[in-house]
Amino acid sequence: MRNTFYVTTPIYYVNDVPHIGHAYTTIAADVLARYKRLQGKQVFFLTGTDEHGRKVEQAAQEAGESPACFADRVMHRFKSLWTKLNISNSDFIRTSEQRHTVAVQKFFRVLAEQGDIYLGEYEDWYCVPCESFWTDTQLVDGRCPNADCRRPVEKLREESYFFRMSRYQKQLLRHLEENPGFVQPESRYNEIVSFVKEGLRDLSISRTSFSWGIPVPDNPQHVIYVWFDALLNYISAIDYYGGGERFQSFWPADVHIIGKDIVRFHAVYWPTFLMSAGLPLPKQVFAHGWWTIEGKKMSKSLGNVIDPYQLVDEYGSDQVRYFLMREVPFGLDGDFSRHAIIGRINSDLANDLGNLFSRVIAMMEKYFEGISPRAEAYEGIDAAVKDKGVTVCKTVDQHMNQLAFHRALAAVWELIGFTNKYVDETAPWALAKAPGEKKRLATVMVTMLEALRLISVLLSPFMPDACEIMWQAVGGATSLAQCRHTDLAEWSVVTPGTRIHKIPPLFPRIDTGSAS
Ligand code: MSP
């Protein structure tokens, strides 16, 4: 069985400032990448920036810079955000890089050799912000039909190279029918199936109206259409051009994580390009929903764009990551509000998780001077915690494989709740006072430590910083990053004599100012 895993995010347009939507996609991909590493997979996790096209050219002009200088400057907004959010990407691809250019040109040639590219003329309505052409019938009230755009469109007529997408309609439909998991969630799958059933038009894949892009091989008056260029990042970054080991090991991608607005590009255009090139298709395209802000669409004009930098400064990186993954089922739309994030931090993180940790560690200090004791005979109530732990590991695995991040977290919270109840029921403070109960107390404490250890491993893809601290606190010998999923199945990992460390509160409560 292949032991590699390849996950991608969309590459972000450099002309925009990073917002919560960008952070969301990238955090989700990071959580998945970290989880797969935990399982011992060799993971390639790709993100990057989409730097060509009219939009970027225009933004550069407005800034009085060349597009290349503009892109060099602004792509750092994304790179540094990923550092701030603890994103563990393996690579960062920029479409302005040479390795990308050569790959795109090679791919273009391959498609041309298949007879799938021809020169024609294009006339249609063009939406600059969406970089998309639309037909008369697609327009809504004469404007861009994209529900999140609806801006005015302009008529463009130009000589253009076309890709014979129509040729692949049947093959794509068959692929969709044979692989219902290819596009997820199901609602998006159904949308794509109906779209393809309506028939595929050939696709215009070059432009002559601007120059900031990759030149068409042998006809540099044309630059390659930005979506053709952008989608190829998924293979240019793993050395499609050289066709070397990286490409052999990681293609096809396991999952492209994207937002719902760009499903058509990923689930129709991209697979047909790959079919023409004779390459295998990605195994899955997973489209998440959109965030609204306090019930309203996020937009510059409303001035409600959430800046992820500010969010992390205010609440902390782990807290933001947790909130975004827990609050909304992955695939559905969600609403961001300060009230909701503070609620999650105070109740799930500070109360449930934070308290459990500090309680157990304080008791370890008090009853065993912070040195883990030897567990003697396990009783039924102790075994129940272990069983719960094993079941939760399995449940988490199922949910993670379906990208149901909120469910995976809910499952870990069941274990947290179960362990909190165990603390109350076994009442270590009473055992500590009762004569002759020292051995029983030791077993109870070790059971709690094992549960904490497991919790910190299971949550580590979501909250890597806090979990590393928790893991070390309960005596994790190596760094959590070296921990493998197989370690989870073992229960007696906390060796007697291990020093258990006191830690400051991991998730301080946020004072909401309301009297309570
Ligand atoms: N450059 C293209 C992608 C090319 S991939 C080959 C692009 N870039 S983008 O910067 O505009 O958007 C990137 C992602 O951000 C998309 O997946 C989009 O869905 C997501 N989001 C933009 N606004 C969003 C929200 N309000 N909420 C959630 N995600 C949103 O498209």
Image (cartoon, helix red, strand yellow):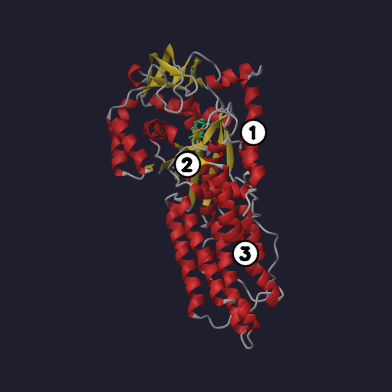
Inspect this view and state whether residue 113 appears.
Answer: yes
Would you say residue 476 is visible in this rendering? no
**What whole-number distance in Å separates the C-alpha atoms at marks 3 and 2?**
30 Å
- Secondary structure, mark 3, is helix
Q: Which residue is mark 1?
A: 77
Please report whichever mark, 1 or 2, sits nearer to the chain's N-terminal start. 1
Q: What type is the residue that disc 1 sits on? A: Arg
Which label is found at residue 357?
A: 3
In the image, taking residue 125 as reference, residue 343 lies left or right, namely right
Q: Which residue is disc 2 drawn over?
A: 334
Please tell me whether mark 2 sits on a helix, a strand or a loop: strand
> Which x, y percent locates residue 474?
64, 67
Relative side of 176 to 78, left or right: left
How far across and how far down the image is residue 393, in percent? 48, 62
Instruction: List x then y, in percent, for residue 368.
Output: 69, 77
| Number of other residues with Cα within 10 Å of mark 1, as a class: few under 14, some 14 to 19, many 20 or more | some
Q: Secondary structure at mark 1?
A: helix
Question: How would you rate the neighbour count of disc 2 (Cα within 10 Å): few for under 14, some for 14-19, many for 20 or more?
Answer: some
Discs 1/3, front: 3
Looking at marks 1 and 3 on the same chain, the residue that comes earlier in the sequence is marked by 1
